Amino acid sequence: MAKLIITQVKSGIGSTKRQKATLAALGLKKLNQTVEHKASPEIIGMVNKMKHLLKVEEVN
């Protein structure tokens, strides 16, 4: 299964509570922080909802 490297590139300050909770669920707390997750449908769905704040790279 592929892995995703997710980096937060924009601040979540103006975001809704739900969007902030999604960032926290992804493990992102700070700007320019990077986390690695397996490419599961749940993670891909969260990334698609937050794509305006994130940079995503796929690693095999």
Image: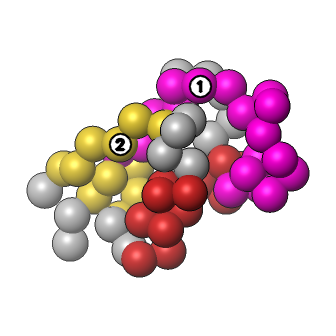
Q: Is residue 8 left or right of residue 17?
A: left
The numbered dot on residue 10 is 1
The numbered dot on residue 56 is 2
Gap between marks 2 and 1 measured at Cα: 13 Å
Label 1 environment density (alpha carbons within 10 Å; few <14, some 14–19, many ≥20): few
Q: Is residue 39 left or right of residue 25?
A: left
Residue 18 colored magenta? Answer: yes
Quadrant where the N terminus is found in the figure = bottom left
Residue 38 shows up from this direction: yes
Magenta highlight range: 5-22
Q: Earlier in the sequence, mark 2 or mark 1?
A: 1
The correct choice, above or below, for 21 with respect to 40 in the image is: above
Position of residue 45 measured from the top left corner of the image (x, y, whole percent): 49, 68
Colour setup of the view: secondary structure
Residue 27 shows up from this direction: no
The numbered dot on residue 29 is none
Position of residue 2 measured from the top left corner of the image (x, y, whole percent): 21, 64
Quadrant where the C terminus is found in the figure = bottom left
Q: Amino acid at mark 2?
A: Val
Q: Amino acid at mark 1?
A: Lys
Position of residue 13 measured from the top left corner of the image (x, y, whole percent): 80, 29
